[in-house]
Image: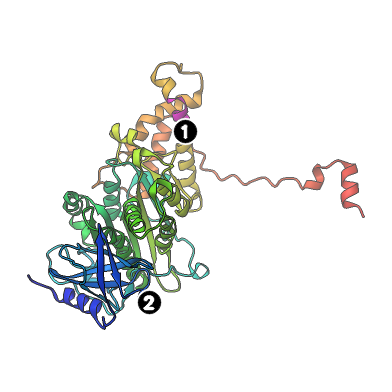
Amino acid sequence: MHTSFSDLSSKTRSMERASITGEVRSALGLVLTVTGLERAVGIGARCVVQGRKGPVLGEVVGIDEGGTRLLPFGSWDGIRTGDRVAVAQSGDEIRPDAAWIGRVIDALGRPLDGKGRLPEGTNPCPLRQTPPPAFQRRRVGAKIDTGVKVLDVFTPICHGQRMGVFAGSGVGKSTLMSMLARSAQADVIVVGLVGERGREVQDFIQEDLGEEGLARSVVVVSTGDEPPLMRRQAAWTATAVAEHFRDQGLSVLLLIDSVTRFAMAQREIGLAGGEPPTAKGYPPTIFAELPRLMERAGPGTGEAGDITALYTVLVDGDDMDDPIADAVRGIMDGHVVLDRRIAEQGRFPAVHLLRSVSRMLPDCHSEAQYAIYRTARRAAARYADMEELHRIGAYREGTDPEVDAAIRFSAPLEEFLTQTRRESMAPEDTFGHLYNRLSEAGIQVNLARKEPANPAPLRDKLPEHVKKSIFDT
C-alpha cells in the first residue's frame, strides 16, 4: 500500500517517545479497557494499540479503578487481550498550509481527493484551541455580501458573526451552504462535513460546491459510518484550519454541517465513557463542548482576521425545542430557520422570514435598507396573519387596505426570493428589486429619517405637590 510522506510524518509524531506502555485487559463494543496507564494519561490523551493487523490509534475517554477506557479512531478488529498499548506524545494537532486550499481531507488531516501528498505547514495548530480572550477581540465587523437575496435582506451576516441554520432533513441546508461558499465575501472557505452520508460527499463537492467553490475552500469530511471520535474530530479539525488562516490575517468563512451529528458523536463518546444520560440521552459534556467549539469562531484579535461561522442544526421532526437546537440558539448571534412547508411549495432557499433573526440588525443595514427590510417584513407578517382566511375565501377585499397590499405583495415576494444554487445577486440590486415590488403592490416605503422626539423630563410630568416634596429642599 502506498503511504504518503505526510502520513508517515503524522504517524511518526503520534508514536514518538511512546515509552509509557500498558496492555489490553478487555474489549466490549467500541470500548477497550487498558491496564497500566492509569497514572500516566488523562482524558483526551492519544494511545497506540499494537494489534495483529497493525497499530490502531485511540483516545482516552474514561479512567477509573478498573483501568483506562479507549475509543478508536478506526476499528479494534484483530485486537486481543494482552496487546501492547503505548502512549502517543503528540497527535492532537495539525499543521495547515496554504496549499490545503482546494483540497479535501479527513478528520486527521489526511488527503481524500487523490491529488497526492498534502504539504504540512510549520506552525502546529491544536485541535482544541482556547478561544481568543473576550476583552481582546474586536467587535463584529461590517456586513458580508453573500449573494443570497433572502439572507442579505432579512438575516444579514457580518464579519465575525456566528449563525445557526436550523432545518429538518432534505430542506436545503447543504444547498444553502454551497451558495454561500460560491458567492460570499471571504478569503478562504472551510467546510466541515460531519457525519455526512458517504453517497452525498461527491455530490456536494462536484455539484453543489463546484470548481469555483472548491478553488477557495478546504473541505474536511467525516462520513456517518466512521467512529464517533472521527466525526467529532472533523468539527475540531475544520475549526483549527479556520483558525490557522484567521491568524494569517485572512477573513474566513467556516461552514459546519452539522452540529447535531457532532453532538451525536459526543453522546456516543460520553456514554461509552460512563457519563449519565440527560435530555434525549445526551450526556452533560455535550452542553459544555458546544460553546467550546463555537466560541473559537468570531472576530480575531490584533492583526488577525476573523472567522464568520455558520453551523447547521438538524432538528428531528422539525422540533425547534430539541435540546441541541435550544442550546445552539442560545450561543449563536442569530439563526436562520428553513421551513419544510416553504420547501414543499417550491421556494428555495426555504428560509422562514418571520422565524429567522440576525442580532446584527438594525446597525448593519443602512437607513434606506433597514426601511425596506422593515416594510417588507411587516407586509409578510400581515399576510401570514390573514393567510388562512384569504385561502378559504373568508377575507373580503377592501376590509383592510394594509392587508390588501400584503396579499398583493406575497406572490411577488415569494417569486423574488426564489433562487437557484448558481444564482447570485449584489445586495444593492436586491434591495432595489424588493423596493420596486413593494411599490408595485401599493406599499409605501418611508425612506426619510425620523428624528426621535425628546421626551419631556420626568419632573415636568409630575403634579406640583409631588415635585415640591421630591425636588425642593
Helix, strand or loop at mark 2:
loop
> How far from the left and from the top, in percent, is residue 440?
40, 31
Labels 1 and 2 touching (C-beta < 8 A): no
Q: CA distance from mark 1 to mark 2?
A: 62 Å
Residue 96 visible in the displayed image = no
Q: Is residue 346 above or below residue 37?
A: above
Q: Quadrant of the N terminus?
A: bottom left
> How far from the left and from the top, in percent, is residue 279?
43, 47
Is 266 magenta? The answer is no
Task: Look at label 2 and name its amino acid.
Answer: Arg
Q: Which residue does the image show at 25% across and 59% down from the upper left?
A: 30
Report the front residue among 420 and 298.
298
> How far from the left and from the top, in percent, is residue 348?
29, 39
Q: Quadrant of the C terminus?
A: bottom right
Report the front residue among 397 and 347.
347
Task: Look at label 1 and name its amino acid.
Answer: Ala
Q: Is residue 230 above or below residue 22?
A: above
Q: Which residue is mark 1?
A: 381
- Would residue 88 appear left or right of 457 to someone viewing this image? left
First of labels 1, 2 by sequence position = 2
- Would residue 329 appear left or right of 74 to someone viewing this image? right
Q: Which residue is mark 2?
A: 39
Classed neighbour count for the residue bearing mark 2: other residues with Cα under 10 Å, few (<14), some (14–19), many (≥20): few
Main SS of the magenta part reads: helix
Report the front residue among 405 and 134.
134
Which is closer to the viewer, label 1 or label 2?
2
Residue 115 visible in the displayed image = yes
Q: What is the span of residues highlighted in magenta in the rendered image?
A: 380-387
